[in-house]
């Protein structure tokens, strides 16, 4: 059972990373234009020189 | 007639709309129309990015908003706009009042709470699987304590953060000394967490952090869905608001100028070109065209308009340029009224809404008492541990929230207003629909309500006489004169010195003879006429006068509408000021059996009072000045959009367009609304009757209670959406 002392923090930290990613995505307005984002993947942008 | 030559319309001046962003760059927001696919995004953005001054050009596909940021001269704005236009898209200034699909603060806040509580729920669930599936012998005391402590560490901050929607609402209402649905929820969350913390410190066996957080998660999801449901019902109005943004062309001293629609004022002269939306309610001064009124009335067939016709903001001018005189500024336009009516109806203090509020207010103290008594019963009398009793009490608190009751009425009403508005029916007060569902009698006015209100020339006439009559009639604005002129297709003689005797007729000299066109009595016709149509007579010199007959056409769906209303079991009565034989003909054509003709306004009002005294509930449909008292006195009243202002003000419901079917459609929607409201109440009550005893008996866990409660709210909302599918 002593393995738990390592596994628990790892699980929690990973969970927090996930939460942090979610909050970051909300704050950077990634949910504003969902249809646009869906369409943009179809665009070919010329590779910047 | 062609419009006088005017100077070319100058381009819109977007320079005035440019703002400075915090980096000192120029920023402009535009609304781009016609964006339908991914290629559009690329075309627009790349064509703008190529310009050297531009540092950012981003198109929001969901809303059509284009943000451009650039360094340099302000007047580049117009260049950018024409670049986008040249690609084939329509451009207008971005109206910040429309935030259709973008994240506004409340949306974002709720999503954030859901995200945090979801994270907490998932992690705590992971830990509680460990705790619940084993026992202390296998696990060891220390491990269990560790798991409890970590669960607590996750749960407490999450509840504090994600429970804010409930806590802040409960707090603000408690401060006023009242309770609402969020009070039991907050209490339940606080109790569950508090007790779990206590138990953790004590080293006890069971903690309920998982229940608390899961409960919060499901409640938040339910709340978010409720929020979205209310929002989607409002979006019908935003389409209309969009037409109020943009530019209009005004004529000032013969010069044309583009100004913002919001700056239009009454009395200004504006020019509307082909394909342009009419910016404000106005009257046509010059030009003839067809108007597409679908945005405002829902009608897809265009309407022909002539000089003197009134046209409304938001409709589109299809065939030819028009010169118009603004009759109402943009904020006073019918369109703006529509939006305001919608908003008012949403917040309307309808009887059922008030009932639901009252029930909610009574309900919450009862809920708290029930929870307390459950606690006392289980702990004091049935010998359960205080922890178990407390959890049962928490379950009772959660499961009995009258959310469904609170939603039962508003959702249906908002949806009903939205559905009706799409058909061009404006409901002015929330309880108009409730009253409409209860009627048993319908009173119809004749002219302008059952009939189109525009007389039309019928019959064949001698061409020479017709020509003379039409030539005289062009000098008059009398409805019969207009009908005569529009029926005549040939050349008009140029008659000079035409005199009009108001209310009687016109006369002039022509080729040495006196020609008169006017009413029967004025012309001096002696024989009593057997004809029951509207008529005017032409007399040329000493010859025998010649009659012209008109008919006021029945609206084409009048018979169908009356039939549908009769199928619903309503008594239909025709009330008219016209002659008996005219009224009888209209009645027989529409299938109305009860007719009162030659009614003065007082007579009409007395008819209404008699019917009311006999216990009937009456709907009045009318459009004229003499209907206004009856419109105001009836239980519920409807006026067509073509009615005079006073009638529209007196009526509870206004229906746009030339059709009569909206009357029966609105009635059916009203009945369906009442049915759905009753069903929703029934669902809520049945749910509570089953859930509360079950919770009381300890048969439900807190988590199940949360799911059940959110579920009942969703069922009520789902039931309400059945309204949308009604055709």
Image (cartoon, coloured by chain):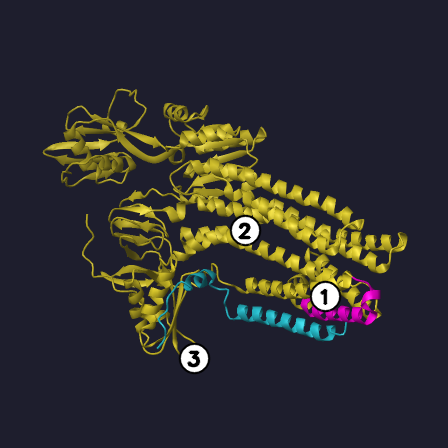
Placement of B179 over or under B471, stated as above or below? below
Q: Chain of mark 3?
A: B
Q: Which numbered tag is attached to residue B346?
A: 2
Q: Chain of mark 1?
A: B
Q: SS class of the residue under badge 2?
A: helix
Q: CA distance from mark 3 to mark 1?
A: 48 Å
| Residue on which disc 3 sits | B23
Please provide the residue range marked out in magenta.
Answer: B134-158
| B559 vs B586, nearest the viewer | B559
Q: SS class of the residue under badge 1?
A: helix
Colour that chain B carries in the picture: yellow
* Residue B673 percent coordinates (x, y): 56, 41
Placement of B214 over or under B20, stated as above or below? above
Q: Which numbered tag is attached to residue B366?
A: none
As for residue B153 lying within the magenta part, the answer is: yes
Position of B141 compared to B489: left or right?
Answer: right
| B432 vs B14, nearest the viewer | B14
Same-chain check, marks 3 and 2? yes
* Residue B693 percent coordinates (x, y): 78, 46
| Residue on which disc 1 sits | B127
As for residue B36 lying within the magenta part, the answer is: no
Q: CA distance from mark 1 to mark 2?
A: 45 Å
Of circles 1 and 2, the one toward us is 1
Q: CA distance from mark 3 to mark 2?
A: 41 Å
Q: SS class of the residue under badge 3?
A: loop
Same-chain check, marks 3 and 1? yes
Colour that chain A carries in the picture: cyan
């Amino acid at each position: 059972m002593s393995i738990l002392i390592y596994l628990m923090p790892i699980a929690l930290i990973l969970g927090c990373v996930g939460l942090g990613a979610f909050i970051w995505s909300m704050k950077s307005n990634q949910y504003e234009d969902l249809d646009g984002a869906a369409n943009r993947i179809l665009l070919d942008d010329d590779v910047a020189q | 007639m062609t419009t006088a030559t005017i100077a070319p319309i100058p381009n819109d001046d977007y320079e005035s709309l440019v703002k400075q962003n915090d980096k000192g760059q120029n920023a402009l927001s535009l609304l781009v129309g016609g964006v339908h696919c991914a290629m559009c995004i690329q075309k627009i953005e790349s064509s703008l990015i190529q310009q050297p001054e531009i540092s950012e050009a981003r198109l929001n596909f969901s809303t059509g908003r284009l943000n451009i940021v650039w360094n340099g001269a302000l007047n580049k704005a117009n260049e950018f706009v024409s670049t986008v236009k040249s690609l084939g898209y329509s451009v207008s200034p971005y109206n910040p009042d429309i935030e259709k699909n973008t994240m506004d603060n409340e949306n974002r806040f709720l999503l954030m709470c859901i995200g945090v509580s979801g994270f907490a729920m998932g992690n705590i669930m992971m830990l509680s699987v460990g705790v619940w599936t084993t026992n202390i012998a296998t696990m060891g005391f220390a491990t269990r304590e560790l798991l409890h402590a970590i669960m607590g560490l996750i749960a407490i901050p999450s509840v504090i953060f994600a429970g804010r929607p409930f806590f802040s609402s409960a707090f603000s209402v408690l401060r006023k000394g009242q309770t609402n649905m969020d009070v039991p929820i907050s209490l339940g969350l606080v109790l569950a967490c508090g007790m779990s913390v206590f138990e953790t410190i004590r080293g006890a066996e069971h903690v309920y952090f998982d229940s608390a957080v899961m409960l919060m998660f499901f409640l938040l999801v339910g709340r978010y869905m409720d929020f979205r449901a209310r929002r989607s019902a409002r979006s019908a109005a935003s389409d209309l608001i969009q037409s109020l943004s943009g530019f209009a062309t005004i004529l000032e001293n013969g010069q044309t100028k583009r100004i913002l629609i919001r700056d239009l004022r009454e009395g200004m002269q504006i020019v509307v070109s082909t394909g342009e939306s009419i910016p404000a309610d106005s009257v046509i001064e010059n030009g003839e065209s067809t108007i597409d009124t679908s945005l405002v009335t829902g009608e897809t067939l265009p309407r022909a308009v002539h000089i003197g016709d009134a046209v409304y903001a938001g409709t589109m001018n299809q065939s030819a340029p028009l010169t118009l005189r603004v009759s109402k500024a943009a904020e006073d336009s019918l369109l703006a009224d529509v939006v305001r009516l919608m908003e008012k109806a949403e917040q309307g203090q309808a009887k059922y809404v008030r009932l639901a509020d009252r029930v909610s207010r009574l309900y919450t103290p009862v809920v708290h008492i029930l929870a307390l008594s459950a606690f006392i019963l289980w702990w004091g009398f049935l010998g359960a541990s205080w922890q178990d009793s407390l959890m049962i009490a928490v379950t009772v608190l959660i499961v009995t929230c009258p959310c469904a009751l609170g939603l039962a009425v508003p959702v249906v009403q908002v949806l009903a207003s939205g559905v009706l508005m799409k058909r061009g029916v404006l409901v002015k007060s929330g309880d108009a629909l409730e009253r409409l569902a209860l009627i048993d009698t319908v009173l119809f006015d004749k002219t302008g309500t059952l009939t189109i209100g525009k007389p039309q020339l019928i019959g064949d006439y001698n061409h020479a006489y017709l020509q003379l009559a039409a030539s005289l009639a062009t000098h008059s604005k009398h409805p019969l004169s207009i009908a005569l002129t529009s029926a005549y297709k040939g050349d008009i003689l140029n008659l000079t010195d035409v005199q009009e005797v108001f209310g009687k007729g016109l006369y002039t000299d022509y080729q040495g003879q006196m020609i008169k066109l006017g009413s029967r009595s004025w012309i001096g016709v002696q024989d009593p006429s057997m004809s029951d149509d509207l008529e005017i007579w032409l007399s040329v010199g000493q010859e025998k006068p010649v009659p012209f007959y008109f008919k006021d056409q029945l609206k084409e769906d009048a018979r169908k509408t009356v039939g549908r209303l009769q199928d619903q079991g309503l008594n239909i009565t025709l009330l008219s000021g016209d002659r008996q034989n005219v009224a009888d003909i209209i009645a027989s054509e529409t299938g109305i059996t009860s007719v009162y003709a030659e009614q003065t306004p007082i007579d009409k009002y007395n008819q209404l009072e008699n019917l009311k005294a006999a216990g009937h509930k009456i709907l009045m449909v009318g459009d004229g000045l003499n209907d206004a008292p009856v419109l105001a006195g009836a239980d519920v009243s409807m006026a067509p959009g073509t009615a005079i202002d006073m009638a529209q003000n007196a009526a509870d419901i206004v229906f746009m367009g030339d059709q009569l079917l909206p009357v029966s459609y609105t009635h059916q929607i009203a009945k369906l609304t009442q049915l759905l409201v009753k069903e929703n109440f029934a669902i809520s009550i049945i749910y509570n009757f089953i859930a509360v005893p079950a919770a009381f008996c300890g048969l439900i866990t807190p988590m199940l209670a949360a799911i059940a409660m959110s579920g009942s709210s969703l069922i009520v909302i789902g039931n309400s959406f059945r309204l949308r599918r009604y055709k």
